[in-house]
Amino acid sequence: MAFGSGNFEGPSGGGVMSEINMTPLVDVMLVLLIIFMLTVPVITHSVKLDLPRAENAPNEIKPKTVNLAITEDGTLYWNEAVVSKEDYAARLAELAVQTPQPELHIRADRKVQYEHVAQAMAAAQRTGVHKLGFVTEPGQ
């Protein structure tokens, strides 16, 4: 690409031309314009179809939750019903074999001894209950 042409040796040579030759730039722009004009209709072309509609929802079986409450004196409540330690272990064994396995939510009194909570968690672990959670109240 030349920026100037002419006779540079004489006093009447006119000097260097400082203009850019626009012809190659216009040629490139026209080629790009033609390429875009040819490719855009191909990209946006689609076949119009009237597709059938169907209602579907995923079949998600949500496991139930079991609430275990432990009072200050160590009494166990299985979904608001008082249970003994032996009955608690039997219910945990039934809970462990269910598919999907229900979640065991433990709500313990603020003043309960940790020993009672640890025994309840150990019994759940021995029977194979894997989903265990603690229910708390937000602090002020």
Image (spheres, rainbow, N blue to C red):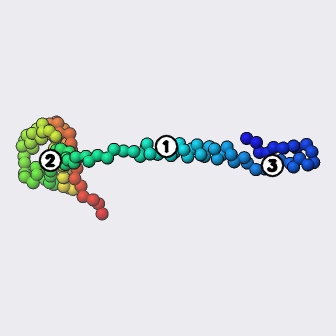
The N terminus is located in which quarter? top right
Kind of residue sitting beneath label 1: Leu
**Tag 2, which secondary structure?**
loop
Which mark is nearer the camera, 1 or 3? 1
Mark 3 or mark 2, earlier in chain:
3
Give the residue displayed 86% in from the left and 48% down from the top.
Answer: 15
Kind of residue sitting beneath label 2: Lys
Res. 38 mark? 1
Give the residue displayed 9% in from the left and 42% down from the top.
Answer: 91
Bin the neighbour count of mark 3 within 10 Å (Cα to Cα): few under 14, some 14-19, many 20 and up: few
Give the residue displayed 43% in from the left and 43% down from the top.
Answer: 43
In the foreground, 113 or 96: 96
Residue 25 lies, in percent from the top left, at 66, 46
In the foreground, 138 or 33: 33
The C terminus is located in which quarter? bottom left
Residue 47 lies, in percent from the top left, at 33, 44
Which residue is labeled 2 in the image?
64
Res. 92 mark? none
**Tag 1, which secondary structure?**
helix
Between the C-alphas of marks 1 and 2, the distance is 60 Å
Mark 1 or mark 3, earlier in chain:
3
Between the C-alphas of marks 1 and 3, the distance is 38 Å
Res. 17 mark? 3
